Amino acid sequence: MQFEQWLLQHEPVIRLGFFLATFALMAGWEAFAPRRPLVVPKGRRWLSNLGLVALDTLVVRLLFPTAAVGVALFAEARGWGLLNYYRLPAPLAVALAVVVMDLVIYLQHVMVHAVPLLWRIHRVHHADLDYDVTTGARFHPIEIVLSMLIKFATILLLGPPVVAVLIFEVLLNGMAMFNHANVGLPRRLDRPLRCFIVTPDMHRVHHSVEDDEANSNFGFNLSWWDRLFGTYREQPRAGHRGMTIGIHRYRDPAVVDRLPGMLLLPFRGRITGYAINRHQWGDDDARS
């Protein structure tokens, strides 16, 4: 319990440290070996994307001061959740908890594409006209709050060890920056890696303007779920350098790459179906 209290106390510093280290590594990699040329000036996009990250962090800390680690400690103290009821060896419990929480994130990601109202919020992430390390943290505050509530419910039902929650949070943030980075791995390395984890080339397909490509490769960390549930797509039709990033209808940088426009994007236009709900791709409603 003493160690877990220490984790709770230092969780923000631990997460921030891993975030900054991973961000610096991927940003440096992008600078020296970019996978694609950028179409929007990086300075402007980064200012807006990182401004949104700062706002999201503030909202989460104000609404959920103890965050996910605190909820895990709360559940453990009361014996709530399957893994608090059925005692497993600690390493097995940690591994199982990380895998189950990763599956929940995959299902959540499918859900925000499948439900038109949720897609309105999630499209802030997809409307980025470029694809780099900052895209991995570009989410509307409403989606961040929804994600936290889903995560809390998962923790209360699952009862994961506190250390598993911290490991998962660090992995999720780090992998989001890794697989959204404007980098590429040699094919001989990318192919075996994506049997286990999501690589940048694998996830980049998901950010295509083409509806059927955008509704594939939903995983953030483990790549198993896309293969298991039939949502895996190996490559974009136009190739990684030829594909267009973003959403067909939203191409104005003043709207999608400015912080006020990003915050207002969920409230633009009417509610329509998205590609995942349709048998035919390519009509105007599916591009909203």
Image: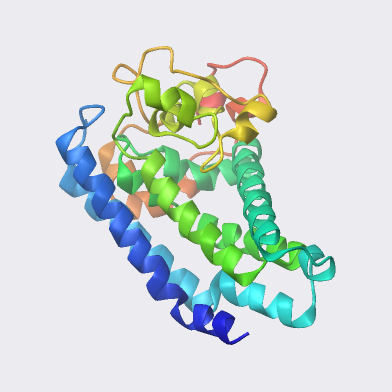
Q: Position of residue 214 (x, y in %)?
A: 50, 27
Q: Position of residue 26 (x, y in %)?
A: 28, 46
Relative height, residue 14 to residue 34 (above, below): below
| Residue 1 shows up from this direction | yes
- Residue at horizontal 59 percent and vertical 37 percent from the top: 113
Q: Position of residue 106 (x, y in %)?
A: 61, 42
- Residue at horizontal 49 percent and vertical 70 percent from the top: 60
Left or right, 66 with respect to 225, comes to left
Left or right, 36 with respect to 125, comes to left
Q: Picture quarter containing residue 132?
A: top left
| Residue 248 shows up from this direction | no
Q: Picture quarter containing residue 217?
A: top right
- Residue at horizontal 53 percent and vertical 66 percent from the top: 166
- Residue at horizontal 56 percent and vertical 27 percent from the top: 216
Q: Nearer the viewer, residue 139 or 98?
A: 98
Relative height, residue 159 to residue 66 (above, below): above
Name the quarter where the N terminus is drawn: bottom right
Q: Position of residue 105 (x, y in %)?
A: 61, 48
Relative height, residue 31 to residue 55 (above, below): above
